[in-house]
Image: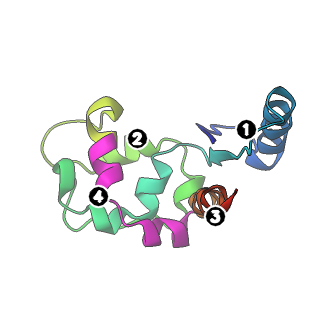
Amino acid sequence: MLLIDSDDDCPATLGPALLDRARHARADKEISVVLAHREFEAWFLAAASSLSGRRGLADPLRPPQDPEAIRGAKEWLSARKTDGTRYKPTVDQAPLADAFDLGQARKNAPSFDKFCRDVERLLRAD
């Protein structure tokens, strides 16, 4: 599985191009390409309420209307920290990934839903 941020690229264009390149390089392997729309942290925004009070985040923490439309999810998280620190991927990403509600993220972030579907497909593959 290749999982990267799409940043400002269109996932519907970049994803298939990367998948084609990966399949060309390793035709013997089952491959999946998932692009977190904009940033990996957009998935945290999609399940923000499940992260209330964690890692210095505000409590309550309400998710934005369209989490994957936000450019600057890391900054959004930093702006909602109440402990005087900023969001740091090297420090905060793993604990938040361990804590966020997968169902909420899947419901509110189509790219996370694709990630889940692809993981399920790869696990079922022979």
111 drawn magenta? no
Please, what is the dominant secondary structure of the magenta stretch? helix
Residue 122 makes an appearance in the image? yes
Q: Which residue is under mark 4?
A: 99
Image quadrant where one finds the C terminus: bottom right
Could you tell me the amino acid type at mark 4? Ala
How far apart are labels 2 and 4 at the CA level?
A: 17 Å
Q: Which residue is under mark 2?
A: 74
Q: Which residue is under mark 1?
A: 9
Q: Residues within 10 Å of mark 2 (few under 14, many from 20)?
A: many
How far apart are labels 4 and 3 at the CA level?
A: 20 Å
How far apart are labels 3 and 1 at the CA level?
A: 22 Å
Q: Position of residue 124 (x, y in %)?
A: 64, 63
Query: Splitting the image into 4 quarters, where does residue 85 fall?
Result: top left
Q: Nearer the viewer, mark 3 or mark 1?
A: 3
Which residue does the image show at 63% across and 64% down from the upper left?
A: 117
- Tell me: 124 left or right of 85: right
Image quadrant where one finds the N terminus: top right
Name the element at disc 2.
helix
Q: Earlier in the sequence, mark 3 or mark 1?
A: 1
Residue 78 makes an appearance in the image? no
Query: Splitting the image into 4 quarters, where does residue 83 fall?
Result: top left
Q: Which residues are magenta?
A: 94-109
Q: Which residue is under mark 3?
A: 117
Q: Position of residue 15 (x, y in %)?
A: 77, 43
Q: Position of residue 16 (x, y in %)?
A: 83, 44
Could you tell me the amino acid type at mark 2? Lys
How far apart are labels 1 and 2 at the CA level?
A: 18 Å
